[in-house]
Image (spheres, helix red, strand yellow):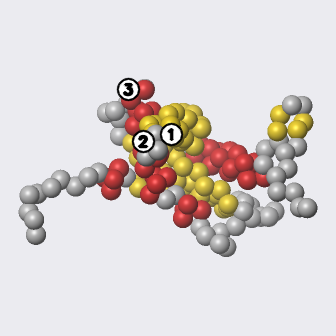
Amino acid sequence: MSRILSINIEDGHPRQTISAQLGIDGERLAAQFLEDNGYRLVLSNFKVPVGRNSRGVSVTGEIDIVAVDEETLCFVEVKTRRSSEFAEPLASVTRRKQRQIIRTARVYRRIFNLSQMPHRYDVVSVILEGETEPSIELIKGFWSESKFRKKAWSGDIY
């Protein structure tokens, strides 16, 4: 019978899975890339409860990197892949993921009283293909909250 799940225990702690380690490596490279491009890093892996889903289960939101670019607070999502052959890393920043990051960013801004500070949502795409140099791309303002705002009803029926 083939093994479906394998957890190796060393010193009482489970090892990182290969995909988890890939994400950690990607976030480290993204953080360095952002610093090299003038961002001031504030924190990484900000996690906070953001509400409940339709079944009443508590939902936790996470922001990979919070940084400041000039005078703008940036909430950065990092997507790391071994290859872009199947799909670009940006394809996994879905509307659902964007909405979750917006909710988490609102909590962050409320906690630290930053509601008046300009902010935006950036994405860093990292491709770690074999032994080649990593490919890193920064997309500033990948999405905005405006596309999630409900439209005001004008009263016209048709």
Labels 3 and 2: the sequence-earlier one: 2
Secondary structure state at the residue bearing disc 2: helix
Q: CA distance from mark 3 to mark 2?
A: 15 Å
Could you tell me residue 60's position as x and y percent? 53, 38
Coordinates of residue 66 in the picture (x, y in percent): 52, 39
Query: Callout 3: helix, strand or loop?
Result: loop
On the image, numbered disc 3 is attached to which residue?
113
Q: Is residue 17 shown left or right of residue 95?
A: right
Can you see residue 73?
Answer: no
Answer with left or right where residue 101 lies relative to residue 133: left
Looking at the image, can residue 90 be seen? yes
Residue 139 picture location, percent across and down: 50, 57
Indicate the quadrant where residue 117 lies.
top left
Left/right placement of residue 17 relative to residue 56 reads: right
Image quadrant in which you'd find residue 81 = bottom right
State the residue lying farthest toward the bottom: 85
Q: Are marks 3 and 2 in contact (CB under 8 Å)?
A: no
> Which amino acid does the dot numbered 3 rest on?
Asn
Q: Pointer 2: what residue?
A: 103
Which of labels 1 and 3 is toward the front?
A: 1
Label of residue 57 in the image: 1
Mark 1: secondary structure: loop
Which label sits in the foreground, 3 or 2? 2
Which amino acid type is marked by label 2? Arg
Which residue appears at 10% of the width and 69% of the height?
A: 158
Quarter of the image with the N terminus is: bottom right
